[in-house]
Amino acid sequence: MKCKITGKKIIPFMSFGKMPIANGFLNKNDFKKEFFYELKVGFSEKFSLFQLDEYPSIKKMFHKNYPFYTSSSNYMIKHFKEYANWSKKYLNSKSKIIELGSNDGTFLKNFKNTNIEAIGFEPSKNVSDIAKKKGIKSINRFFNLENISDLKDFKTNTDLICGANVVCHIPDLINLFNTVDKLLSKDGVFVFEEPYLGSVYEKNSYDQIYDEHIYIFSGVAISKIAAEFDLKLIDLIPQSTHGGSMRYVVCRKNSKKSQSKNVNKIISYEKKINLDNSQFCKNFKNNCEISKKNLKKKLIELKNQNKKICGYAATSKSTTVLNYCNIGPEIIDFITDTTPEKIGKYSPGSHIPIIDHKLFLKEKPDVSVLFAWNHAKEIMNKEKIYKFNGGKWLTFFPRVKVW
Ligand code: TYD
């Protein structure tokens, strides 16, 4: 494989095997023509960058029926409100904002009824249309150099360019950073929060690795990449979202903005656990293999006891777990989910039926595998009756646990 920034050869250190599109929920009659690729990962020493080898074309991933709505989680709605409030320290009443991957407008909605001019770039039409209905200026395109020519007022005049769970989806980081350079004001900031390599490694949450997550960033990686584009990393703020994310704050190299103490603190920690070099990769690979063995063993044990096993939430992350561990409908009877686009379909690759979450209690599963483990708090609050009636949860990070 080639490093996506330097173009230099990297040897992948691990394969998760044949993978379908993580969000490619499908109908029965589409099983035969399902698309697969090999999910392999590698590490660029130069940029300390954890990256996928092969990945499907981005048009296969973000399209008119993209089945993910930011607003499907109440916790995420709250999170984006707090993110918007926090970002106001970089804004004045006449500032301009651009959000990348603005989805259904959950973040930008917080700037309605202000004088701030905010626009979102959202390549998936269905979610972009929902944002428009909320009165948000949502441009149904990818954020790149080719798509900003008509944004004259925003050129070198945007105080905040931001995103959440989006930069790691963008294959061409060179084009991305050059686009940011064209738009960012002299003292503006580029802020993004993404699943964090430190959390993935610590929790062994390898399910963050799937087609859409072309990179898993760390502080050290972003500081090196930013420097390459005459930018500097001025803050690192850990987030609890997506099972452990990091908010990166980047500005122009010659901006007067000072660097928070967090940057050196977090980067020193990353160096201590070898996230800046490929030494951690071997451990990570071993941990994934152990996790796979233990999860499979536990599920087979439960199935042999005739337990009815369900998956809770048909997340993109679960596509990696189910396919890497070879778990199908012979083990997990069904997965419940709240997303209309997923209900009635089958999980990618593993072909487990997805049923409406409304049937969760009626189906009385003995054990529910919590695929949306990152939303555990919200889900436990919601599903007290399930537990009260004797239902058990199965979680698998950092280790397999039935409770
Ligand atoms: P998320 O962890 O954000 O998914 P991904 O791995 O794709 O980033 O979870 C979103 C999915 O989980 C979505 O399909 C809706 C589903 N979900 C439920 O079904 N019930 C819930 O209570 C929550 C929070 C999510």
Image (cartoon, grey):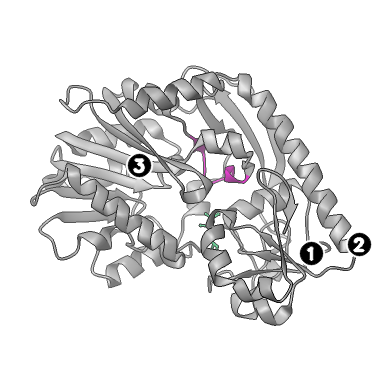
Residue at horizontal 65 percent and vertical 53 percent from the top = 319
Residue lying farthest front? Answer: 388
Q: CA distance from mark 1 to mark 2?
A: 14 Å
Which callout, 2 or 3, points at the residue further toward the start of the chain?
3
* Residue 258 on image: x %, y %: 21, 26
In the picture of the structure, the residue carrying the numbered disc 3 is 192
Helix, strand or loop at label 2? It is: helix
Horizontal arrangement in the rendering, residue 292 relative to residue 302 (left or right): left
1 and 3 marks in contact (CB < 8 Å) = no
In the picture of the structure, the residue carrying the numbered disc 1 is 329
Return the residue nearer the eye: 177 or 151: 177
Point out which mark residue 304 bears. 2
Q: Nearer the viewer, mark 1 or mark 3?
A: 3
Read off the magenta span.
207-216
* Residue 104 on image: x %, y %: 36, 64
**How would you rate the neighbour count of disc 2 (Cα within 10 Å): few for under 14, some for 14-19, many for 20 or more?**
few
Q: Quadrant of ligand 1?
A: bottom right
